[in-house]
Amino acid sequence: MMKPMNVPFFRPDVGEPEVEEVVAALRSGWLTTGPRVRRFEQEFAGAVGAAHAVAVNSCTAALHLALEALVLKPGQGVLVPTMTFAATAAVVRYLGGVPILVDCDPQTANLDLRDAQRKIGQLRLGQLPGAIPKDTPVIGIIPVHVGGCMMNVADVQDFADRHRLWVVEDAAHAFPAAWRPGPGSPWQRCGEGSAAVSCFSFYANKTITTGEGGMAVTGDAKLAERIRSMSLHGLSHDAWGRYAAGGSWDYRIIAPGYKYNLTDVAAAIGIHQLARAGEMREQREASALAYQEALAAVPEVERPVVAKDRILSWHLYPIRLRTDRLAIDRNTFITELKQAGVGCSVHWRPLHLHPYYQETYGWRPEDFPVATAIWERAVSLPLFPKMRTEEVQYVIQTVKAICARHANPISKSA
Ligand SMILES: Cc1ncc(COP(=O)(O)O)c(C=O)c1O
């Protein structure tokens, strides 16, 4: 047995170059949106293969601005997975839209397009919960690449085309990530696909971080321009454009915008995180593959499925407990992990099981049988760059020990 240790759920990897760049930004005399943000935007656009990138202060802001630029109107419906974080559906509500929740795929936990089709059918027949009128126009879909395992983006686009929907990707977990339709086809990076806008997160525990931050990328110059302007009060140009040499003091308010711009201090971190994004992904992948190998021998645990035609960002390492083989439930399992010093999380309690969505729309657990069943078995184990071998081994050993201690006697003999 290894000596007890503490393994956090996540430990950010912030190096000397980030520290030096932040100090340089502080000393430069320019703290808010300026040259470092511009550089970060250009380099990020290059990294995902997109024409335009607008840096903002969160992925939530990027999603909000994307929907605003696509002119989501009050009462219009948007398909949103129930298996996601609060932000994906909240931004639809910000604009008065109606999030139409969709169940998830049992393997990846990503949005299930067959259920999306079913929900549209039920809507038209007036069979969705009472608060959603049957004539609600459905105008968009927000797929989430859960944990950084991308959906089949071509299928999403096909579905969207058939139903005349725009696609905004919630790519909070999916940098760097890629997919391809099959062996031999070229890889397509998350952000260079057909989505109208792809939104990334640089929150503290994301695959690259700026503390808080986000990026909206798009191939459409007009959308990019609207997003940029609305990220800063709807002004015709930002402070850097006003005060830098050659800039003009004058500006026009073209719409009542928001205050979502990223600062140069934050971008200073992002520039160097971005430069190491591939290396940090490989480090997370190495730890994830060590988990995969060791946990193959633990029948009480289901491991994430890794398809050959995906490059995962490995934002998360989500396991599912075989609760039929265990004498304890997921919550007790988590308590025992914590008692042993291992941090963990759950992705996620699905939206339809939160009071707001239950009370506002009347969603019931049985409207989403897959998400309702899998969330009760879900545990995300620690995964971060520069995770030490002994930390990975300690997590594995702890998971195995809990499973051995609580293995169901019936399944033990089976
Ligand atoms: C799927 C998903 N979407 C959006 C967000 C929001 O990201 P941010 O905190 O950058 O606003 C998160 C954050 O965890 C997330 O997991």
Image (cartoon, rainbow, N blue to C red):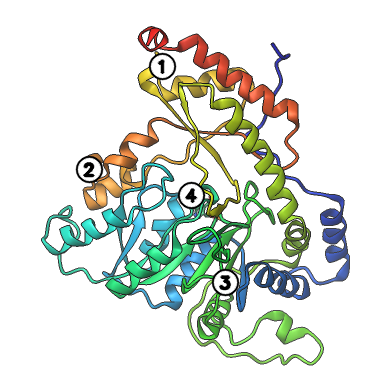
Dot 1, crowdedness within 10 Å: few (<14), some or many (≥20)? many
- Amino acid of disc 1: Leu
| Labels 4 and 2: the sequence-earlier one | 4
Q: Nearer the viewer, residue 248 or 351?
A: 351
Q: Which residue is mark 4?
A: 146
- Amino acid of disc 4: Val
Q: Which residue is mark 3?
A: 217
Is disc 3's CB within 8 Å of ligand 1?
A: no
Q: Is residue 94 visible?
A: no
| Labels 2 and 1: the sequence-earlier one | 1
| Labels 3 and 2: the sequence-earlier one | 3
Q: Which residue is mark 1?
A: 326
Q: Where is residue 43 shown, x and y percent of the image? A: 72, 70
Dot 3, crowdedness within 10 Å: few (<14), some or many (≥20)? many
Q: Where is residue 113 shown, x and y percent of the image? A: 32, 57
| Labels 1 and 4: the sequence-earlier one | 4
Q: CA distance from mark 3 to mark 4?
A: 19 Å
| Looking at the image, residue 75 lies above or below residue 320 | below
Q: CA distance from mark 1 to mark 4?
A: 26 Å
- Amino acid of disc 3: Val
Q: Which residue is mark 2?
A: 364
Q: Mark 3 falls on what kind of element?
A: strand
